[in-house]
Image: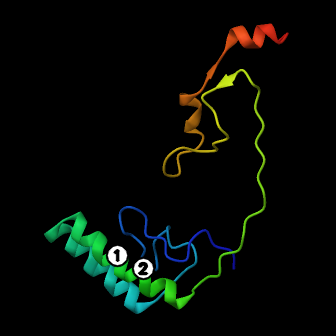
Amino acid sequence: MASDSAFHTTPTLTGTPSAASNTVHLNDPKIDHALKDIRMTVLTKGMKAGIAEARELARYAVGQAYAIPVPYNYKYTFWWPWVKGYTGESGAGYYNMPNWVHYVWVDTELKKSMGY
């Protein structure tokens, strides 16, 4: 099974069996219980303490080898030289593609000098 993540919890720590972010349909009682504990820690002790617990849980999850990541194929992106501020992004941020277009601009003088 291909997966973008074997232990994907999202910034809101919603990696439960029924969560949309559970892309591999992982159902491990130890992880489910630990995520509940982590959410409670975030609410009672703060994000820093919750992140510390999540790191420990990640060590466990990686050791379980729920998925074996494989190398991705090469990806090529081409753009005109007059498109400035662009370096091949397909998205900027968390699942909000193609919002990178707000950060690029067209050098109209260069475009005109190249005959376009």
For this rendering, which residue is in front, 70 or 23? 70
Residue 31, given in percent of the width and then of the height, sits at: 40, 85
Q: Residue at x 70, y 8 (%)?
A: 109
| Residue 36: quarter of image | bottom left
Q: CA distance from mark 1 to mark 2?
A: 6 Å
> Mark 2 is on which residue type?
Ala
Residue 49, given in percent of the width and then of the height, sits at: 22, 71
Disc 2 crowd, CA 10 A, few/some/many (<14, 14-19, 20+) = some
In which quadrant will I find the C terminus? top right
Disc 1 crowd, CA 10 A, few/some/many (<14, 14-19, 20+) = many
Q: Residue at x 42, y 77 (%)?
A: 16
87 to 112, vertically: above or below = below
66 to 69, vertically: above or below = below
Q: Say whether marks 1 and 2 touch (CB < 8 Å).
A: yes
- Count every numbered label the image shows and give the total: 2
Secondary structure at badge 1 equals helix
Circle on res. 32: none
> Mark 1 is on which residue type?
Ala
Location of mark 1 (residue): 54
Location of mark 2 (residue): 58
Side of 57 where 44 appears, left or right: left
Q: Residue at x 36, y 76 (%)?
A: 55
Secondary structure at badge 2 equals helix
